[in-house]
Image (cartoon, rainbow, N blue to C red):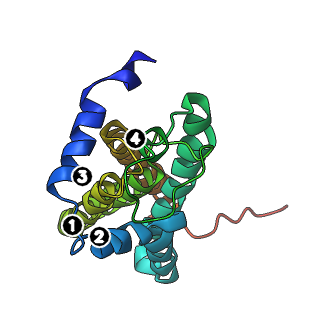
Amino acid sequence: MSFFNNPWDPAILFWIQHVFVHPTWTPIMIAISNLVWRGGIWVLLGLGLCIHKTYRNTGISILAALILATILGDGIIKHLIMRLRPCIEYPWVPMAIPTPSPADYSFTSGHSFASFASASVLWCKNRYIGIFAIVLAAAVAFSRLYLFVHYPSDVLTGALLGSIIGTISYTCVAAVQKKLAVDPKAPAHNHQKIS
């Protein structure tokens, strides 16, 4: 696909390697990336929010968004596109983490997808908390470029799709909650006299 044979993807990626990669930053980038391994911090956050009744809908929205992101991103898109990761296409670049399998495809970035899906739910719920969540999601996305396991278009597409999925998830859960909510003005029981 011509979209993936563009010159700016590797150019930006190698610029990041040249400008930002440093032994001081590498452990930090690994730690940030590991926060989202298999959903990581977002799954824990979603489960934690589900415990408290006040925040349960937000927790459900995050978990639903993560499930959709995993199905769409890792389950469908990656296997349709089958784009090789940059660390596979440029094997001479030193890696700070184990090199993924060639069958573990690059497009889209699952870390970015999951992070922006969760952050978008939090943004919809509360703008102030959402800002911090989006900053963390952006840091996760950048860590994937820093660690040379994704191209910029992988993380940008993951971020875009994640934001859409997160917003849809929050909207759907809120709509279901509204529909299930009991109208306080409605009578609690509707008894009919049997004659």
Question: Spatial distance from mark 1 to mark 2, Cα to Cα?
Answer: 6 Å
Name which residue type carries label 3.
Answer: Gln
SS at mark 2?
Answer: helix
Q: Are discs 4 and 3 less than 8 Å apart at CB?
A: no
Which residue sits at x=22%, y=61%?
21
Q: Are discs 4 and 2 less than 8 Å apart at CB?
A: no
Q: Are discs 1 and 2 less than 8 Å apart at CB?
A: yes
The label number, if any, that marks residue 26 in the structure image: 2
The label number, if any, that marks residue 22 in the structure image: 1
Question: Spatial distance from mark 4 to mark 2, Cα to Cα?
Answer: 27 Å
Percent x, y of residue 12: 22, 39
Percent x, y of residue 138: 26, 57
Mark in the foreground, 1 or 4: 1
Question: Spatial distance from mark 3 to mark 2, Cα to Cα?
Answer: 11 Å
SS at mark 1?
Answer: loop
Residue 180 is left or right of residue 168, and the answer is: right
Mark 3 or 2 closer to N-term?
Answer: 3
Name which residue type carries label 4.
Answer: Leu
SS at mark 4?
Answer: helix
Mark 3 or 1 closer to N-term?
Answer: 3
Residue at the extreme right of the image, as rendered: 195
Name which residue type carries label 2.
Answer: Thr
- Could you tell me if residue 31 is visible in this image? yes
